[in-house]
Amino acid sequence: MKHIYLSICLFLITISIAVAQTYTTPNTGVNWTLDDIANASPSTITVSGSDYTLLENLVISENDMLVLGSDLTLSIDSDLLVTVFGTFLIDGNSVTITAIDQTAPYNGFRFEEFSQINIQNTTIEYGGGLRVLTEDFTLNNCTITNNVEGGATTGAVISLTRGIPQITNNTISFNELPAIASAANNTVSAYIYNNHIEGNNQLNTNRPQINMGTTMVNDTLKIIQNTIIGNPSLDQVGGIAVANLVGGSIRANINYNTIQNNRYGLTIVGPDSFANLYNNIIEDNNTQNIPLQGGSGVSLNTNSGTMEVIAEGNQIRRNLWGITVIGTASINLGDGVDSQGYNIFSENGNEGELYALYNNTSNTIMAKNNCWIEGQVNTLADAESVIFHQVDDASLGEVAFDPVGTNCENLSTEDVEIESFSFYPNPSNGKINFNNIHSFTEITIYGIQGNLLLNKAISEGENKLTFNLPKGLYFISFTNEAQRVVRKLLVP
């Protein structure tokens, strides 16, 4: 009997040792640093110069703030979680948050509703990701890499829940889960700008690297100027998906992104969906190589309700399908009013056939002024040869593609002369100059959301343009009947 009692005692002691302790800040409205916590609870954080080690779970209370304001490294023990109800601010020039042992990751971060989160210039690695339950969230100029499944998040390394979180200028790469996601039953209109996103979803599940659900009605999801690169060995991982599967709506601007080497490029699914797709480069999204299961550069699909997408200036190359339109979905690829066309298609196909556009709906699709076969003069017959529509199946809608783009042989991205076109000064406070040697007829300035701000006719030769725009980043488009060049403009 004594031996049994002793065994039970040892078992209970083992359990008590295995369960991590938690330090909670006292909720007194104090701004805490890691040194402050180490002084208040030496068992929670140890310090050696600019190296800090977290040995217990940490909770930042509702009225408290944790500030990491200097360059430092925070190493976290396995299975530990940092939970924030209050404010979490990192504004040092170089902060690293990592695991003590890379083979024994920590659980990551959980940012509760109404918390205030601003993370700058930080590497976050070998943890369980960022569970973002608050809408007051900024992640800027950070590196998020080698994080794992099974910690704070399950849907993505950055898992969003509400509002308009800001995710800008980051590198998000080689995580076990997708890069960024929101749940199907939450409304999130994130601002996802200028991130390099590569090789995420290392578990190779059937999810894209950016996987967003429904959006807010009055605030638009913005996925702008990101690079989304897949790993060709991960044959289940897509590029971007925005889906309305459980009721709600989609309002999205997906512009100026480069999407390459994924299972598919971009898909929008579900009713009450409205999106602008401008100036994206969507190439080589064919890693699964099964045409009936994916591989579209752009796929639009809804079986009920309305889906309206406007597409202009996109470059879609070497996917299994160029654009597929399914169910009751609709796309405007060039009506001369809302879209000028200028989309470029090249070598999208499978099983020996080219499919620049597959209209698998009863809707008429406007698609004027596009280059259907890049690198050669296009004829109506050329366009017809790569478009599947009413001519091929009488039950389908027509694609109205007359006129086709002219001088399509000059629209290749290899055209060094047109690519060298520029204006000056940039940044500019209200005036730019340029030499119009390419016979551009029109200049247009857009905001980063794709909203039109200025449109003006221009002449050949030297031109000067004045404008009055607030501080920010803009895009300037120079166009004629055959060509379009888009450049960034910074107003300081």
Image (spheres, rainbow, N blue to C red):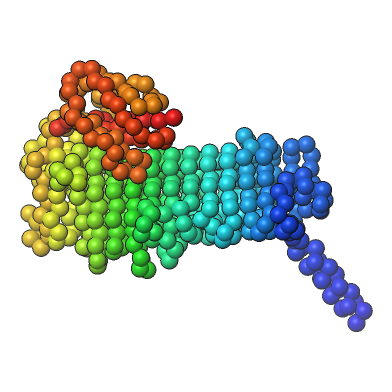
* Residue name at image x 67 percent, y 45 percent: 67
Q: Nearer the viewer, residue 108 or 186?
A: 186
Q: Nearer the viewer, residue 480 or 51?
A: 480
Counting labels gives 0
Residue 191 drawn above or below residue 6: above
Residue 364 drawn above or below residue 322: below
Residue 157 drawn above or below residue 245: above
**Is residue 484 found left or right of 197 in the rendered image?**
left
Q: Quadrant of residue 185?
A: bottom left
Q: Position of residue 440 (x, y in %)?
A: 19, 26
Q: Is residue 417 at least partly visible in the picture?
A: no
* Residue name at image x 33 percent, y 24 percent: 431
Q: Position of residue 210 (x, y in %)?
A: 42, 51
Residue 361 drawn above or below residue 34: below
Q: Position of residue 50 (x, y in %)?
A: 74, 37
* Residue name at image x 38 percent, y 40 percent: 225
Quadrant in which the C terminus is drawn: top left
**Is residue 353 found left or right of 186 in the rendered image?**
left
**Is residue 346 found left or right of 201 in the rendered image?**
left
Q: Position of residue 323 (x, y in %)?
A: 24, 49
Q: Is residue 115 at least partly visible in the picture?
A: yes
Q: Nearer the viewer, residue 228 or 137?
A: 137
Q: Quadrant of residue 441?
A: top left
Quadrant in which the N terminus is drawn: bottom right
